[in-house]
Amino acid sequence: MSSFDFENDIPQSLAQAAHRGTSFVPKKRAVEERTSYAQSLQADYENFRQHAVQGGTLSLLEDQFATYRQGVAQRTRAYLESSSRCLSSMITGRSNFPTERNRKRNAAADKKREDLLDFQKRARAAILRTLRPDLQPVRSSDSDAVERLQEDLESLEGTQKRMKAANAAIRKYAKEGAAAQVAALMALQFTQQEAAELLQPDFAGRIGFAGYRLQYANANIRRIRARIEEIKHVQAKPVTEIQGTVARLEDDPPANRVRLFFPSKPAQEVITTLKSGAFRWTPSLGCWQAYRNPNSIGLARRLAGSCEEVIPATENS
């Protein structure tokens, strides 16, 4: 995919018109505008592609990028069209210059520019979330949460074991000198450069892996083990429903969600409270839904009204 393909998203006539009232060389500025646009998209595409390769999501790349390109092109053209109505007194002359009208046109163009930049920022972040599922935090509701955490745990335990083995090898061959220590470290699959770096004293004169690094690894291992047990415990909890005088509350630990079902659209102040509490309307379920935590559960109970009964959801269905 060449940058020349991207340039065609922006008509030369539009790019030139955008600078006709503000530049002595609108044709040159038009070329620069289209080139800059093309280079920016090319850089975005290469960045997305690298992430898609790392995330194993190359099959999603083209569709994701096509949508992104369309959005950027649309907003860039809108910005240039708005800019074409802007003037500069250096170009038009100061006589009868429409100062106030031009100020409004400049403000409108600036707003279009801000819209473009905001879209790019949000869209890039959204695409990277799609292309790199491996970088997303593990949620209790993820079907593979335990498996992913188990993989992290095994990786950390392997790293810790390797660190301990390295320190043991350094101690064992200390009397035989650095060459013997390097050879021992390389036998543990460290590169020669890594082995040499491990034998370089740190600020406290320590060689190998410092104790604090092993302690940090231990803390992470304990944290992930605890998280695995916590998720197993939460996912084993039943889904329950609480019937309130205002709404029905559904507490769904396995999905890590709390939901509120109102018989009709709630008042605007209630909607405002729901949104401020991180609840979002979910049309597919016909409810207001939020991630499950003490705050969301507490707010849901308050908005549901006086609770009359607690029923296992499986019995209520």
Image (cartoon, grey):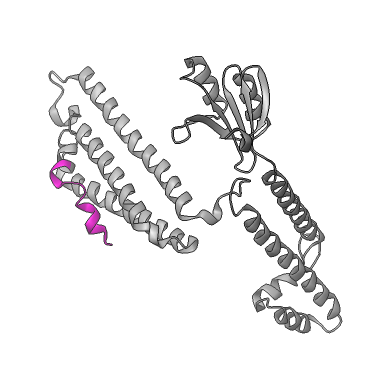
Is 207 part of what is drawn in magenta?
Answer: no
Is 11 part of what is drawn in magenta?
Answer: yes
Q: Which residue is drawn at 26% across and 45% down?
A: 73
237 or 133, which lies in front? 237
How many callouts does the rendering have?
A: 0
Q: Is residue 14 left or right of residue 295?
A: left
| Above or below, comparing residue 193 to residue 155 in the picture | below
Image quarter of residue 1: bottom left
170 or 20, which lies in front? 170
Q: Is residue 115 left or right of residue 99?
A: right
Q: Is residue 62 left or right of residue 78?
A: right
Image quarter of residue 175: bottom right
Residue 265, image x, y percentages: 46, 20
Residue 228, image x, y percentages: 71, 52
Q: Which residue is drawn at 42% across and 49% down?
A: 127
| Above or below, comparing residue 282 to residue 193 in the picture | above
Residue 101, image x, y percentages: 20, 19
Looking at the rendered image, the quarter that the C terminus falls into is top right
Q: Is residue 244 visible in this depiction of the protein?
A: yes
Q: Which residue is drawn at 45% across and 55% down?
A: 131
Please give the range of residues in magenta. Answer: 1-14
Q: Is residue 25 visible in this depiction of the protein?
A: no
Residue 298, image x, y percentages: 66, 25
| Above or below, comparing residue 116 to residue 51 in the picture | above
168 or 273, which lies in front? 273
98 or 160, which lies in front? 160
